[in-house]
């Protein structure tokens, strides 16, 4: 696009804005090919749309949108709610490129009540409203099966797919199936239940699916008592069974409060990078939660939480056919709905509902993150590195992390180990073992400085990439002595952190900075678990090396120092004579029988020189 074309495009758009009214409505942006690329709503069309062209847009995504606009149209409505509904309808119809994307629950099952002569009730994932009425979707499969189970136990709707007609039933064309014989169906096909009774059962089942279980339960109880008073005890007994089944089902539902009759609850949770938002919807009917569902919205133009929630509420209420007059939300809403009011609870049962909704949204976000990380394990590692970078305020991502630990017993067999983690995973080929050479006695600080000095001097000489973060297995003291070598002696700028332990020798805090300060990390978090693994790994590595060294010393004998006497000869001698003392006392002829004449002579001369 040339400069002249761009100026002509902007002039055309601004001329449309000047003629727009100060009324609520919906506006549509078109690209060069006259395709709708964005649909918005506004309390004042002129003020809202002019903000795209007459103000400096600071968001990159919005700048991109504005650069694509070649034409504008708008629709004026009477109320704010009409503007919301119109926007929602246009987004559904045109699916504009720059509007937020709703990832709905099409993969979740629903419950269908068919439009047949004798309706069936079953679960399905295919939504076709020509075949019947659909309830759901149900994100919690167990909850859906619980509802289906109570309906089939109480009302026993038919499960066969036979197409029944009134004439066919009157003429006796049909035969009952196994379900009738095992008492799972009332067999309307052979008139064991009348058409009117069957339809009444289906009507009550619909009420249960809507969440009106308590009302149906009370009606059944009243009918049971009425039949009992008329001495129709068989009918009353059948109604009693239904009533008890419904009561058992109701007690297992989550009761919020008897005073809450019909309420919608909405909450919104953002992911870490603010690209996606998770909106949870809870519906409460007669004090019981009968719907809980979470939608994922993908931001396109850095929309605010209020923008997303305001777009989601009418759409979700329409999907679930909600007519609740009060909507619980987490913050003030600048928009209003015609048939409902927004309410922000501060305490009580309604506040508990909001907290429950937020908890469901967070759990959904966590589940989606886990699913993504299973498909792409590197995503989890990158997330943990970014989290550690943020916590420690590091200049770059801590891809390579090195950790040191010493091991000795009263200064003997002193060793140290260095482990390397790359991308939050152990890189065992880069692990290194060190025998302490210059330190005498049990001096952990001096041993640590020797190892760090040797490690990074060599890396500098070999021009090996230096670590992004050093972690010491210890608190402030260890950090200080490592800093003296790394920063003061070698003049390297490598961040140093420390992992301190409590009285029970459990890692309980991460230290960083100069002077070292405790970094706030939840000890139950994934990041803290990885840091604890690093500490446990370096401790295991150092102590294993120390044990190996001690074992070699413990098994060392005088025979190991004799040139010409190898492991096999040593093993044969010890097997034959049992100890070094008896080998010394043995004659050359006896030794020859075990290891041969040449090695027997070497052994005899060695013992003669040292005077046995």
Image (tube, rainbow, N blue to C red):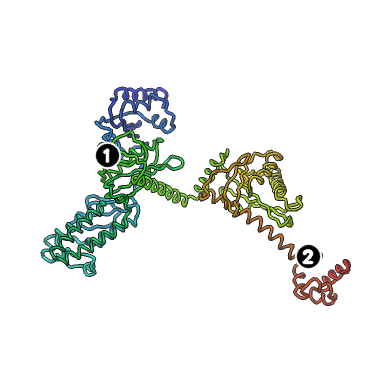
The percent position of residue 290, horizontal first and vertical second, equals 30, 51
375 lies above or below 328: below
Please tell me how crowded label 2 is: few (under 14), some (14-19), or many (20+) other residues with Cα within 10 Å. few
- Rendering quarter of residue 221: bottom left
Q: Name the residue under label 2.
A: 560
Element carrying mark 1? loop
Quarter the C terminus occupies: bottom right
Badge number at residue 603? none
In this rendered view, identify the residue nearer to me: 374 or 79: 79
- Rendering quarter of residue 590: bottom right
The answer to whether residue 211 of the structure is visible from this angle is: yes
Q: Which residue is drawn at 26% across and 41% down?
A: 325
Q: Which residue is drawn at 35% across and 54% down?
A: 140
Quarter the N terminus occupies: top left
Q: Name the residue under label 1.
A: 340
Element carrying mark 2? helix
The answer to whether residue 190 of the structure is visible from this angle is: no
Q: Going by the image, does 199 lie left or right of 448?
A: left
In this rendered view, identify the residue nearer to me: 173 or 337: 337
The answer to whether marks 1 and 2 mark residues whose Cβ atoms lie closer than 8 Å is: no
Q: Which residue is drawn at 75% across and 53% down?
A: 441
Q: Going by the image, does 254 lie left or right of 500?
A: left
The percent position of residue 517, horizontal first and vertical second, equals 59, 41
The percent position of residue 60, horizontal first and vertical second, equals 44, 32
Cα separation, mark 1 vs mark 2, equals 91 Å
In this rendered view, identify the residue nearer to me: 561 or 527: 527
Q: Of label 1 and label 2, which has the lower sequence position?
A: 1
């Amino acid at each position: 696009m040339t400069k002249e074309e761009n100026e002509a495009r902007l002039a055309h758009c601004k001329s449309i804005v000047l003629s727009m009214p100060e009324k609520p409505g919906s506006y549509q942006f078109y690209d060069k090919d006259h395709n709708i690329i964005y649909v918005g709503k506004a309390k004042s069309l002129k003020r809202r749309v002019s903000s795209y062209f007459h103000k400096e847009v600071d968001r990159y995504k919005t700048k991109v949108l504005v650069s694509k606009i070649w034409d504008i149209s708008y629709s004026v409505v009477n109320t704010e709610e009409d503007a919301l509904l119109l926007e929602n309808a246009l987004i559904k119809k045109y699916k504009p490129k720059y509007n937020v994307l709703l990832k709905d629950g099409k993969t979740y099952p629903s419950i269908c009540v068919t439009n047949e002569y004798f309706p069936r009730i079953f679960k399905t994932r295919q939504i076709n409203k020509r075949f019947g009425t659909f309830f759901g979707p149900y994100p919690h499969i167990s909850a859906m099966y619980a509802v289906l189970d109570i309906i089939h136990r109480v009302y026993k709707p038919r499960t066969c797919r036979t197409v029944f007609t009134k004439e066919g039933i009157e003429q006796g064309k049909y035969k009952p199936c196994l379900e009738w014989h095992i008492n799972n169906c009332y067999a309307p096909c052979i008139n064991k239940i009348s058409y009117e009774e069957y339809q009444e059962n289906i009507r009550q089942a619909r009420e249960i699916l809507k969440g009106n279980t308590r009302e149906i339960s009370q009606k059944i109880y009243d009918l049971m008592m009425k039949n009992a008073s008329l001495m129709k005890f068989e009918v009353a007994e059948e109604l009693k069974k239904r009533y008890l089944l419904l009561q058992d089902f109701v007690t297992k539902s989550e009761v919020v409060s008897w005073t809450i009759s019909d309420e919608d609850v909405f909450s919104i949770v953002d992911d870490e990078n603010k690209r996606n938002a998770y909106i949870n919807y809870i519906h409460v009917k007669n004090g019981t939660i009968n719907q809980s569902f979470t939608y994922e919205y993908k931001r396109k133009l850095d929309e605010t939480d209020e923008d997303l929630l305001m777009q989601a509420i009418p759409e979700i209420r329409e999907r679930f056919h909600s007519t609740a007059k009060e909507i619980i939300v987490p913050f003030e809403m600048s928009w209003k709905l015609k048939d409902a009011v927004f309410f922000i609870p501060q305490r009580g049962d309604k506040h508990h509902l909001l907290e429950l909704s937020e908890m469901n949204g967070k759990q959904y976000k966590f589940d989606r993150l886990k699913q993504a990380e299973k498909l792409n394990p590197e995503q989890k590692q990158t997330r943990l590195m970014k989290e550690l970078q943020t916590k420690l305020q590091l200049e770059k991502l801590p891809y390579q992390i090195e950790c040191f630990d010493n091991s000795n017993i009263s200064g003997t067999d002193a060793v140290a180990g260095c482990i390397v983690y790359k991308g939050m995973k152990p890189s065992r080929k880069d692990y290194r073992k060190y025998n302490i050479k210059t330190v005498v006695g049990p001096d952990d600080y001096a041993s640590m400085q020797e190892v760090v000095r040797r490690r990074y001097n060599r890396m500098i000489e070999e021009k090996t990439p230096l670590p992004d973060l050093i972690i010491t297995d210890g608190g402030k003291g260890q950090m200080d002595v490592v800093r003296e070598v790394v920063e003061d002696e070698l003049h390297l700028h490598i961040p140093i952190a420390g992992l301190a332990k409590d009285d029970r020798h459990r890692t309980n805090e991460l230290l960083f900075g100069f002077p070292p300060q405790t970094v706030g990390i939840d000890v139950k978090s994934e990041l803290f678990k990885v840091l604890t693994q690093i500490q446990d790994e370096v401790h295991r590595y150092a102590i294993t090396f120390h044990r190996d060294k001690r074992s070699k010393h413990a098994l060392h004998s005088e025979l190991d120092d004799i040139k010409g006497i190898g492991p096999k000869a040593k093993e044969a001698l010890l097997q034959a004579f049992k100890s070094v003392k008896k080998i010394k006392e043995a004659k050359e002829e006896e030794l020859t029988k075990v290891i041969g004449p040449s090695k027997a002579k070497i052994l005899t001369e060695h013992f003669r020189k040292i005077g046995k």
